Image: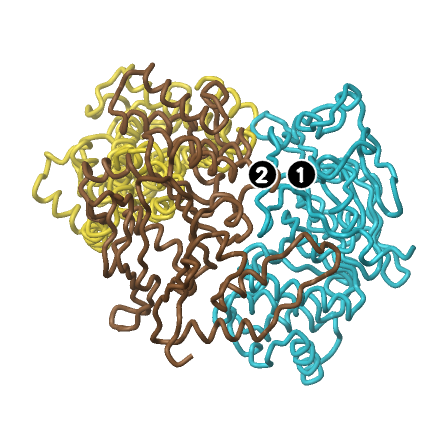
């Protein structure tokens, strides 16, 4: 595993850049554990200070130090995105592989539900959840809800690959070797869908974080929990651009773009590495 | 001798780099051959023997990681010399279809599934032929009728035709401009036996009519037996034997060829066929000396260290074997008469 | 005499066109033959693409349900709807060998995993030593050894070796019947005879019956005892392999034999086909009423009413 990392860093520039960007954000998010101020306290520093040596990212109109505030925000947002991506990947792998390999009525039933999840409008449902749960809607609940809504497209993609694999000769070989369907799906077919899982995980994180930001900006989440979305909500609420506190908006947006770019580069380069075709080429066939 | 193609000392390697693992696969290693006007030259070889890579170089369809490392390839078209490995895009475009064309294995890779056959013909052949509208159509119809295809196929889509018909259409496409040189890469591999024979006889017929040269690639020796005028056998990236079809079958001078022709089963003959032991060498790490030596029943110490040169052993007959004088037809080899047409 | 495998008037019909279309195609029409358990044999099914030979093989393997008729293996009905227990029991008796050795194993996985899984499932043991012994035993039968194969990936072996591994895997449960669907059509010429000779030795030395499916008449003549020739879903000729192929009677069989490229007259460019033979064979394929008739030499030939 370690040698894989070394290889990737040495021979793949995208991976190096991606790793650098993502590490910066992760380190920044981890700094929140050492924050001198609790996340939700306000008016702990002088408000509206531009970036300086004392306040690296400036301070906002609520009297918070943006450096520490944003490090909390990125920790929460990252955690949220990762939880959604992992949970929804688990659902889409299970449904996609089972549907593609088992076929028949299993496929029809699963794809029926799949199509429902593709078709339902997500935004109104999320707002509905907000009205029902109110302040119970924390990062984790929202992540679980988003995961349950965000697997359908990718399950279809995985199913299409699994369908192709089902008719390959090695699958029949595995059947006549007495392997159980679960074993065939998990050990024979999973390596072939991993590239899809990785690249869609990336797209899924962008999707879920984007949704979280949108909801938060409109005030449909628990606005007391610092996330990238709520940071922007408060900035908007205090008319940051109008009163000239530009750093309150520009800095989180720049950091967000860095994170997306880094994740994207990582996904692309890891994808290339684990893609069965390039793996086979490296194995020398 | 009037040659159309001269290949001299050609070396084409796959140079690959993946995450720090670099690999050099010597797919074509020092091949020298020439193709004459008006002949069918059969190239035989197993999978990953380098025959496909050789064809890619000849057809100017070479792409990285395959690269020509050494040697030269020269076509002689109308007194003009052209090297497909270094020629400019314009030059290649000028000779394609008109002088040099291909018949590929899968007809679907040439015929666009959503276009009628006539559109495909227009796309490929209109410019090289330099004919317009009705004249072009007439020429195409005339050509197709010589291949026993009705003009109505022009109005059809590829999926409406049977596999054999489609393959005949691709042959029509490859020959409509009367090219001097045709490369046929396993054109009948996917076809059924009855259709295969029809298609083969058609290729032969049209070749004789046009007097062009055909390089015919297949791993199937029984196809070569009936198609080729001369056969070249490729083993592990090298040309190991080359000669007139008859001599290759009835008096092979390389142990590999002797094995290939003897291993063909025939109806009416139940002699136990020999099987060749061992496996084809890995081209990334080929054995030293003669590359066939690990599987060769005649191998001596010299074969393990020294590369045998391609020696002329008879008229037109060359072999790369230190012990060619000791090669005899094996049990089960065909016993046709050498003298029949000599 | 007990039957190992009995095919009784089996039909397979596939719907054609959309859901509402009533059109269908008969992939296999009224096929009947049987293999005896007493004497192992190589039974060859010859046919071109679209002849129904692969569909027939899939039905014998229980991967496809016959539309009509019945397939009995050792007196038990073979069906697609067997439960897992019954299917495992069936698979320990009938094993397949597929066409493309390069596709036979997952390229990302080691080969021995398939052999080990077969041994574990069908010999019902989880004892590592027993599994290894069974694997090595099967590999020895095909001229390989566990030492050569253990830990290897498919790309490290040649097509011939892979096909032998596939056969070894099929042999692990000691099945009395092997279904080999075009096992040599994608193997290189120099390695092909090793596989064909291996099938022969399975019959002679290990008493395994083989259903050998091919389009190649020459190898069929070389190894098989009995054969059937199929045209567009119908059996047109059936009988002793040597008798039928030396002197085929049905026009389609004769056409197939005439289309075999011979190496005997190499260099003479003999490629002409008699178009009348093709036309006659095609005409017979569309004749509606026909039946198989027995000839004095034991073969069955399809005859047509009004022909």
* Mark 1, residue position: B331
Dot label at residue B272: 2
Dot label at residue C60: none
- Residue C287: image quadrant is bottom left
Q: Colour of chain A?
A: yellow
In the rendered image, the vertical position of residue C13 relative to residue A187, given as above or below? below
Residue under the point 53% across and 62% down: C256
The span from disc 2 to disc 1 (Cα, nearest Å) is 8 Å
Element type where label 1 sits in the image: loop
A41 relative to B19 in the view: left or right: left
Q: Colour of chain B?
A: cyan
Colour mapping used in the image: by chain
Picture coordinates of residue A269, whole percent (x, y): 48, 33
Same chain, labels 2 and 1: yes
In the rendered image, the vertical position of residue B134 relative to residue B157, given as above or below? below
Give the brown chain's letter.
C
Labels 2 & 1 near each other (Cβ < 8 A)? yes
Which chain is disc 1 placed on? B
Determine crowd level at label 2: few under 14, some 14-19, many 20+ residues with C-alpha closer than 10 A. Answer: some
Of residues B169 and A9, the one drawn nearer to the viewer in this rendering: B169
Of residues C44 and B216, the one drawn nearer to the viewer in this rendering: C44
Sequence order check: which comes first, mark 2 or mark 1?
2
Residue under the point 51% across and 72% down: B157
In the rendered image, the vertical position of residue C289 relative to residue A251, given as above or below? below
Determine crowd level at label 1: few under 14, some 14-19, many 20+ residues with C-alpha closer than 10 A. Answer: some
């Amino acid at each position: 595993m370690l040698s894989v990392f070394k290889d990737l860093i040495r021979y793949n520039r995208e991976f190096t850049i991606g790793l650098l960007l993502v590490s910066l954000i992760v380190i920044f998010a981890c700094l929140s554990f050492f924050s001198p101020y609790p996340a939700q306290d306000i008016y702990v520093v002088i408000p509206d200070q531009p970036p300086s040596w004392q306040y690296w990212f400036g301070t906002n109109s609520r009297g918070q130090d943006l450096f520490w505030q944003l490090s909390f925000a990125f920790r929460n947002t990252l955690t949220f995105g990762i939880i959604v991506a992992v949970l929804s990947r688990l659902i889409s792998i299970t449904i996609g592989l089972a549907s593609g390999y088992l076929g028949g009525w299993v496929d029809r039933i699963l794809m029926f539900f799949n199509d429902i999840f593709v078709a339902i409008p997500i935004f109104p449902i999320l707002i509905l959840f907000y009205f029902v749960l109110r302040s119970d809607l924390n990062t984790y609940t929202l992540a679980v809800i988003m995961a349950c809504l965000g697997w359908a497209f990718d399950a279809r993609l995985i199913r299409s690959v699994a369908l192709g694999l089902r008719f390959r000769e090695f699958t029949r070989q595995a059947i006549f070797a007495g392997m159980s369907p679960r074993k065939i799906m998990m050990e024979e077919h999973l390596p072939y869908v991993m590239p899809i899982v990785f690249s869609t995980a990336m797209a899924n994180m962008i999707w879920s974080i984007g949704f979280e930001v949108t909801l938060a900006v409109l005030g449909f989440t628990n606005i007391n929990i610092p996330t990238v979305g709520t940071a922007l909500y408060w900035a908007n609420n205090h008319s940051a651009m109008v009163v000239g506190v530009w750093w309150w908006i520009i800095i989180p947006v720049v950091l967000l773009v860095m994170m997306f770019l880094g994740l994207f580069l990582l996904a692309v380069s890891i994808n290339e590495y684990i893609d069965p075709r390039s793996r086979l080429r490296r194995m020398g066939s | 001798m009037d040659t159309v193609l001269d290949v001299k000392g050609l070396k084409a390697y796959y140079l690959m780099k993946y995450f720090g693992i670099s690999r050099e696969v010597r797919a074509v290693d020092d091949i020298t051959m020439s193709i004459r006007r008006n002949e069918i030259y059969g190239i035989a070889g197993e999978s990953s023997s380098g025959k496909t890579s050789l064809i890619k170089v000849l057809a100017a369809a070479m792409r990285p990681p395959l690269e020509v490392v050494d040697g030269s390839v020269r076509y002689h078209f109308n007194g003009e010399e052209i090297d497909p490995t270094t020629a400019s895009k314009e030059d290649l475009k000028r000779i394609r279809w008109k002088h040099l064309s291909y018949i590929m294995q899968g007809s679907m890779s040439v015929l666009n599934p959503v276009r009628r056959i006539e559109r495909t013909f227009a796309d490929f052949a209109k410019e090289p032929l330099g004919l317009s509208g009705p004249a072009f159509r007439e020429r195409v119809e005339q050509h197709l009728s010589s291949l026993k295809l009705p003009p109505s196929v022009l109005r059809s889509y590829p999926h409406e035709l049977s596999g054999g018909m489609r393959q005949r259409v691709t042959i029509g496409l490859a020959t409509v401009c009367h090219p001097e040189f045709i490369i046929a890469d396993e054109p009948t591999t996917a076809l059924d036996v009855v259709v295969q024979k029809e298609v083969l006889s058609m290729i032969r017929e049209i070749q004789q009519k046009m007097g062009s040269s055909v390089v015919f690639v297949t791993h199937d020796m029984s196809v070569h037996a009936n198609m080729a005028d001369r056969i070249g056998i490729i083993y592990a990236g090298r040309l190991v034997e080359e000669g007139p079809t008859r001599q290759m079958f009835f008096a092979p001078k390389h142990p590999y060829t002797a094995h290939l022709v003897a291993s063909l089963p025939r109806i009416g003959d139940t002699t136990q066929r020999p099987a060749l032991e061992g496996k084809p060498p890995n081209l990334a790490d080929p054995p030293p000396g003669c590359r066939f030596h690990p599987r060769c029943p005649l191998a001596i110490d010299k074969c393990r260290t020294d590369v045998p040169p391609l020696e002329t052993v008879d008229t037109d007959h060359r072999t790369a074997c230190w012990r060619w004088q000791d090669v005899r037809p094996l049990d089960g080899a065909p016993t046709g008469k050498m003298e029949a047409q000599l | 005499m007990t039957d190992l495998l009995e095919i009784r008037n089996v039909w397979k019909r596939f719907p054609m066109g959309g859901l509402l279309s009533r059109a269908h195609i008969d992939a296999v029409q009224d096929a009947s033959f049987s293999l005896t358990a007493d004497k192992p044999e190589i039974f060859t099914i010859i046919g071109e693409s679209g002849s129904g030979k692969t569909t027939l093989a899939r039905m014998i393997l229980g991967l496809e349900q016959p539309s009509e008729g019945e397939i009995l293996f050792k007196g038990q009905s073979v069906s697609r709807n067997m439960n897992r227990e019954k299917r495992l029991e069936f698979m320990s008796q009938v094993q397949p060998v597929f066409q493309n050795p390069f596709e036979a194993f997952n390229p990302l996985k080691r080969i021995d995993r398939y052999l080990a899984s077969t041994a574990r499932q069908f010999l019902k043991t989880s004892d590592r030593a027993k599994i290894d012994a069974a694997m090595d035993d099967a590999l020895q039968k095909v001229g390989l050894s566990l030492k050569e194969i253990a830990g290897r990936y498919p790309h490290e072996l040649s097509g011939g070796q892979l096909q032998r591994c596939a056969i070894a895997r099929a042999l692990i449960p000691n099945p009395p019947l092997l279904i080999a669907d075009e096992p040599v059509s994608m193997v290189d010429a120099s390695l092909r005879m090793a596989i064909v000779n291996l099938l022969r030795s399975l019959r002679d030395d290990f008493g395994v019956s083989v259903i050998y499916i091919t389009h190649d008449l020459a190898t069929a003549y070389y190894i098989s005892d009995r054969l059937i020739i199929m045209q567009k879903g119908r059996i047109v000729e059936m009988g002793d392999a040597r008798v039928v192929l030396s002197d085929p009677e049905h026009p389609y069989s004769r056409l197939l034999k005439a289309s075999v490229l011979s190496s005997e007259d190499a260099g003479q460019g003999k490629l002409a086909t008699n178009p009348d033979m093709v036309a006659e064979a095609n005409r017979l394929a569309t004749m509606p009423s026909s039946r198989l008739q027995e000839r004095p030499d034991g073969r069955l030939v399809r005859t047509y009413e009004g022909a």
